[in-house]
Amino acid sequence: MKNVLFKGCKSEFFLGLLVLSCSLLTYCNFSRENDDNSLLYWSANDAQEVEFARQVISAWNLEHPDEQIKLQPVPEGQSSEEIILAAVVGKTTPDIYANMWQGDVEFFAQAKVLVPFDTLEGFLEFIYQRCDSALIKEITSSDGHIYQIPWKINPIMMIYNKQVVEEIGGVPRTYSEYLEACKKYQKDNDGDGYVDQWFGYANVRPIWHELRFNFYLLYLAASDGASLVENNHAVFNNQHAIDVFRFFGELYTKNYFTQDMLSSGQDPFLTGKIATKFTGPWEIAHLEKFKPQGFDYAYAPVPVPDDHQGPVYTYGDPKNIVIFNTCKNPLLAWRFLKFLISDENDLLFLKLSGQIPPRKDLTINPLFVEVFKQNEKLAPFANQARYIRGVDNNEVIKEVFDIITQEYQSSVLYGVKSPEDALRDAAKAVDVLLLNM
Amino acid sequence: MKNNKLLPYLLVSPYLIHLMVFVAFPVLFSIFLTFNKWNIISPMEFIGFGNFLRVFQDVLFFKAIYNTLKFLIVHIPLQIIVALLLAEILNQKIKFRPFFRAAFFLPVVVSGVVVSMLWQQLYGFDTGILNRMLTTLGFGKVGWLVDPNMAMVSIAVMATWKNVGLYVILFLVGLQTVPPQYYEAADLEGANHWQKFWHITLPMINPTIFMVVILSTIGGFSLFIEPYIMTGGGPLNSTLSAVLYIYKQAFTNYHMGYSATLGFFFAFIILFVVIIQKRFIEKGES
């Protein structure tokens, strides 16, 4: 039997060949590269952004037959950040990536895997024309270079059920008005002695990114867009932050907000279980698809302290464009990006995706003004876009958020610490973190 | 002759390659990492015993170990009692026995993520079914996942529900190996059901109980999915398990060297616990 199956060296030769072939195939798969001069562009993988990228890249490729761009949606994974990290480690990064969260850019910049845009000809002139100086300051790295192009924002605002809000006396603008509205809307529907409907909702999971939609959001609003970290020191231990902690603390203490996870069941906003929440323009497409007959909603700025004056800032949830240092032709990439974020293509992007380009002429350029006129649900975001902040350019910003999240839990949700103590402890912990970097 | 010597190595090469790539290399690389500071994409920085010194000052890591032990203290006895009870019932001649055996095993094969999300809904403080039932019956609400004293217990109950089917099967195997003549002799002596269970069944399935304890301990130490999905480690870090903390250090904060050190430290704790259990088993067997 043995002789039949493995006839001497002949059989071993074939077995060896099989192993060798598998190895070579695997190697070839890993070492596959673009042999031509084309550049690889990774877009976000939602349908609208893929469609936008497809249209823009087709138009570019038609006009530039010798400078082709290849489109690939970012591969599926738990998060796009993890995919990019894996790509950097495996040296399989695209030339251009157009969906990087602003808070991640500094991490990659410090690791020297990004191309500084300010070293590319014409960039500074272009960026000062497109963005206001506050935004340019925000995206400038600690080493003085700029590694990202601000591309799209989704300002977080307060969405509200129009019918409910009109019944209880109008849109709440301040903490007092919001608390008053909460009191009026809070209700025990089934008579079991427990509240079944709340005026608002915010996720309480102690995960760093949730902070962007509760504390950080209202902190920006209260402080006119102040930083959390400046010159490698925590600067958030101030009256604005204390006010925000105290405000949220009251919401949970009086059961105006629930600590339950409402995200897994039916949409609590559509069912009336809640009447407001802090969210972005992405909610519009979902609500238009699923809203029941007669249901109407609108957006307003998030609540601010009673004595607040002036415009209300918010978190912009910015996603930006970067060029990786594996790019063979950064100048070509830069020329393509100028085309990608030209007036016409920004307009196309706005129309297709409903996401806002962070341009300083957004509310005066007739091209964009017309779109907002036609889409009244989107219009508040155009005005809000003038008063947005991203996050501080710090490579450990996620850990800073995580530290504040822990103290937010202690103080706001469980009352273990006073807002003053919690913020003082958070600031101390952040200072230690920044010192040991 | 030479070719014949090569063949066995070629045949075992898939396993050897797997062992080298997925076991030996990660372990050795982790040991190397413990002496370095590394965020995956920047060059490594040698820091000697810096990571080890940091472990001893890390209050949160010890809190995570305490939480894991708290989980084990609730989970293991509960699992054994429930599994043994169900196995005893399912070993009797009852109607639809095959159906019930399959039904209790079903949660074992369902994804942990799905089970965690379902229980998250059941455990909801304001909107969960359990609290709705309690209030309907006139009781107060329980903060299953929002009360820091209760959250880990709730997760332990859920984990028991998820895993008990596997241990029911193990106990069933154990119960069916008990010689029936022991029970016949006990019947002749006039022993009741409880006496037979206490004096015959339990001593006879002792090896199975120890196996279940060891499997539950190792499984319990690797507690991750349930707190990751249901609570994110909260409230007030009361469900932050050791593995979840190690994961956060590695994949949220990118402290790969430090998380490797925590992993080693934790592995030694598990080793210590398993050695103690092994001593008990050997003592029991002798």
Image (tube, coloured by chain):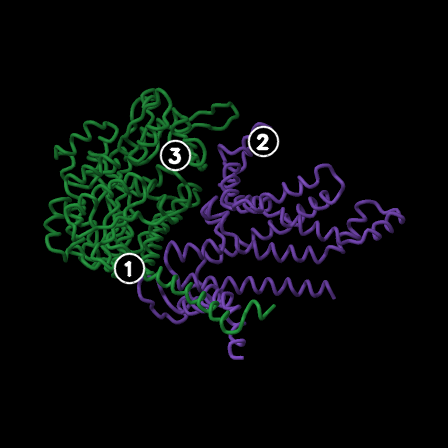
On residue A201, which mark appears? 3
Nearest the eye: B187 or B235? B187
Q: What is the secondary structure assignment of the residue under circle 1? A: loop
Q: How many neighbours does mark 3 have within 10 angstroms: few (below 14), some (14-19), or many (20 or more)?
A: many
The picture places residue A202, in percent across and down from the top left corner, at: 38, 37
The picture places residue A6, in percent across and down from the top left corner, at: 54, 69
| Mark 2 residue type | Phe
The picture places residue A397, in percent across and down from the top left corner, at: 31, 52
| Mark 3 residue type | Tyr
On residue B139, which mark appears? 2
The picture places residue B277, in percent across and down from the top left corner, at: 64, 62
Q: Is residue B132 left or right of residue A144?
A: right
In the image, residue B5 sits, relative to residue B152, either above or below, namely below
Which quadrant holds residue A377? top left
Q: Give the residue displayed 38% in from the left and 68% down from the top.
A: B36
Q: Is residue A198 left or right of residue A150?
A: right
Q: Quadrant of the N terminus of chain A?
A: bottom right
Q: Give the residue displayed 36% in from the left and 65% down from the top.
A: B37
Q: Chain of mark 1?
A: A
Res A2 visible: yes
Marks 3/1 in contact by CB < 8 Å: the verdict is no
User: Residue lying furthest right in this view?
Assistant: B188
Mark 2 vs mark 3, CA separation in Å: 26 Å
Disc with the residue nearer the chain's start (3 vs 1) = 1
Q: Which chain is purple?
A: B
Q: Is residue B226 left or right of residue B195?
A: left
Say which residue label 1 marks: A33
